Amino acid sequence: MRWLRLGIVWSALTIGAFAAEPVDINAADAQRLEALPGIGPSKASAIIAFREEYGPFKTIEDLDAVPGIGSATLTVLSPLITVSASPTPEASVDDTDEPVSGPVPAPVLTINGALERVDINTADVRGLEELPGIGPAKAEAIIGYRNTFGPFTDCQDLIAVDGIGPATISTVREHCTTGPSSDTLPSP
């Protein structure tokens, strides 16, 4: 019974600490991120790596584009996190010295430097992983959905795949295609 009371007190203190001071996902170090529920060392590292590669998060929902963070985790974290109003100078400047408005997806380029779009109706796991914010689990989910329900008619249709939310859609939109045949597919 004593352990139960201690657990309740600890939980109340922990929740109270988060309620008093939300964690800024643009500034938090690994230790602070790991203090969040459902975030261990692996997910904390993924958040930091994503932030370093694509720039600061613009909204809390952008966290959904981080591999390993799905809609369920985002629902739990939303009241406990925040994004800084102004990103740090190092993270907010691109090649043109203009402020970055949010996570910037890495372009998928061909050898000659042209933008290459990934066809989500034909790509295998490895090909889908070329899309920003898509790791092995989300790639498998896309293929599973495609195998069950047929080809996608638009990249926005990825929203129906488990683990893919609006933030992921916004990061893959410019790098995604449904192929030339998707325009002529018969309606189900």
Image: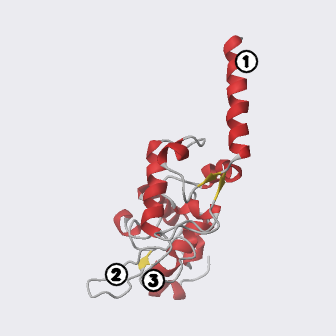
Image quarter (top left, top right, bottom left or bottom right) of the C terminus: bottom right
Residue type of the residue flagged with mark 2: Leu
Element class at badge 2: loop
Q: Calculate the distance from the C-alpha at mark 3 to the C-alpha at mark 2.
A: 17 Å
The earlier-in-sequence mark between 1 and 3 is 1
Q: Which residue is mark 3?
A: 179
Residue extending furthest toward the top: 1
Q: Where is 33 relative to 144, above or below?
A: above
Residue at image coords 45%, 74%: 121
Residue at image coords 47%, 85%: 181
Q: Which residue is mark 2?
A: 109
Q: Calculate the distance from the C-alpha at mark 1 to the C-alpha at mark 2.
A: 57 Å
Q: Is residue 46 left or right of residue 39?
A: left
Q: Is residue 65 left or right of residue 84?
A: left
Residue 1 picture quarter: top right
Q: Depth check: give the residue in front, 182 or 101.
A: 101
Residues marked 1 and 2 touching at CB (< 8 Å): no
Give coordinates of residue 72: x percent, y percent.
Answer: 63, 50
Q: Is residue 124 left or right of residue 40?
A: left
Give coordinates of residue 185: x percent, y percent.
Answer: 54, 83
Q: Where is 44 relative to 63, above or below?
A: above
Crowd class of label 2 (few under 14; some 14 to 19; many from 20; radius 10 Å): few
Q: Which residue is mark 1?
A: 5
Element class at badge 1: helix
Residue type of the residue flagged with mark 1: Arg
Badge nearest the viewer, 1 or 3:
1
